[in-house]
Amino acid sequence: MAAETCIGHDRSMPLPADLDQLDADTLRRLLIEQERELVWRQTKIERLTHELALHKRHRFGVRTERLSTEQVQLFEGNRPSNPVVPRQR
């Protein structure tokens, strides 16, 4: 994931101290701005959660185990040259 520029999104959005004295249009703009910020943050959290899941799957996911050459030789060394085959009755 490419590094993202987060200008304006990393700082908290404090409410103005004179909130009860703002007119309706200003309150609407403030509400819209806060809604956009909330959507951006939720989207960012979802992206990071997804990215983390991918990293976890890559690191801890099920992998097929492969034997090293030395391990294969150990098993081959313990194998009898003339295996006994059980007789069927």
Image (cartoon, grey):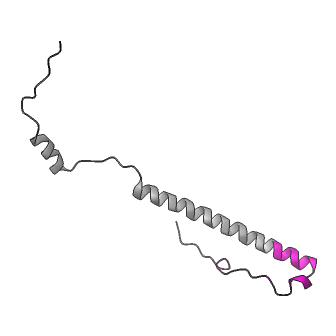
- Quick one: which residue is furthest to the bottom in this view? 17
Residue 88 position within the rendered picture, expressed as x and y whole percent measured from the top left: 17, 15
Left or right: 70 with respect to 47? left
Q: Nearer the viewer, residue 48 or 78?
A: 78
Residue 18 lies in quadrant: bottom right
Residue at 30% over, 48% down: 65
Left or right: 10 with respect to 79? right
Q: Is residue 20 above or below residue 48?
A: below
Residue 15 part of the magenta-drawn span: yes
Residue 46 lies in quadrant: bottom right
Residue at 60% over, 76% down: 5
Residue at 59% over, 62% down: 47
Q: Is residue 28 above or below residue 53?
A: below
Main structural element of the magenta stretch: helix, strand or loop?
Answer: loop
- Quick one: which residue is furthest to the front in this view? 89
Question: What is the tally of numbered marks visible in this picture?
Answer: 0
Give the quarter of the figure containing the C terminus: top left
Residue at 93% over, 81% down: 23
Residue 54 part of the magenta-drawn span: no
Q: Is residue 59 above or below residue 21?
A: above
Q: Nearer the viewer, residue 83 or 41?
A: 83
Q: Is residue 17 above or below residue 83?
A: below
Residue 35 position within the rendered picture, expressed as x and y whole percent measured from the top left: 77, 69
Magenta stretch, residue numbers: 3-31
Residue 24 lies in quadrant: bottom right
Left or right: 72 with respect to 65? left
- Quick one: which residue is furthest to the left in this view? 81
